Amino acid sequence: MAFVSSQRVMRSQELIDSVLTFARKQEVGSRSSDSELVRKRKRERERITAISTELVSRLRSLSRQFPDIDALNEFYRELVSCEFDIHTYKRILSRVQNSAQIIHSLVRIHRGRLEAAQKEEDVASCMSSFIGRVCSAVNDLDSSFIELESIRRKLLSLPIIKELPTVCIAGFPNVGKTTLFARLTGSQAEINAYAFTTKRLNVGYIRYEHHRVQVIDTPGTLHRDHMNAIERQADTALKYVADLIVYVFDPTEQYSREQQMRLLEHVSSFSAPVVCIVSKKDLVSPEQVQEFVSGIQIISEDELQSRMRSLVL
């Protein structure tokens, strides 16, 4: 997805090692006229500054690379909610941001201790305490980093839906939606003879003269009270982006006519107009097809092309 970084989220120990390595490279010398205590104070003060500045910068950068869910449009807000819990997501980002504030507090405390140190061993003890507490704060974020990496991968996998006239293909799993999608758009998608082959929204395009129509192959749904994340994606697309819904009937009765009619009723509850098409006609007799779709207005693929063309011309 366009609004998330492709950069992997580091684990806590990786981040600590990277920041400490960076800080070591920033160390500078002090004047030879200074006492050993003064030189050590100055060196450790610079290390504290380098570590804290780099670490806070990286934590804030990490927070910024993830989207503000509340700033997304309704479609994307609902789509990401199919992938992960939004409240948990916000809580994780808040933890990361709060840790940056904790590190700032540790800097103030340990700089004060450093300036008050009267012995070299006090300077060393202060620095050890600072690094230990910073590492502890970062290690506490490890589970959050793991979760953010999982969320990042899910966000990257979401399709980019453009603001174009949009046709959504709907129906039960394995009724021929993806085969129709491939014929209409020429797009390649996984097609297998088992349910839920389509696990997310597939997006393709058809050009009519100088205009494009966006076509979305939605995951199959079983039309049950408690939909899974895959099924919720289909409803989200039908609800928010469809200008025309193509409902695919399968007369081979993998799913009964009654089941497919109930799902058609659900699909028709959305605001977009619905047209119906029949797939797998070559697998049953013409009489079986006629009996299956009796009383339903069915259109051909040529007629479907005309309906889609009318969205832009």
Image (cartoon, rainbow, N blue to C red):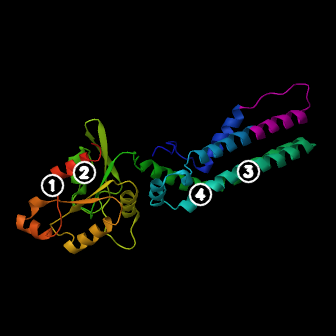
CA separation in Å, label 1 and label 3:
63 Å
Element at badge 4?
Answer: helix
Quarter of the rendering containing residue 264: bottom left
Extreme residue in the top direction: 32
| Residue bearing the label numbered 3 | 101
The span shown in magenta is: 26-49
Query: Could you classify mark 1 by the number of other residues whose Cα lies within 10 Å: few (under 14), some (14-19), or many (20 or more)?
Result: few
Quarter of the image where the C terminus is located: top left
Which circle marks residue 300 in the picture? 1
Query: Which of disc 2 and disc 1 is earlier in sequence?
Result: 2
Horizontally, residue 255 falls left or right of residue 84, namely: left
| Residue bearing the label numbered 4 | 90
For residue 23, say whether it is visible: yes
Horizontally, residue 233 falls left or right of residue 198, namely: right
| Residue bearing the label numbered 2 | 181
In front: mark 3 or mark 4? 4
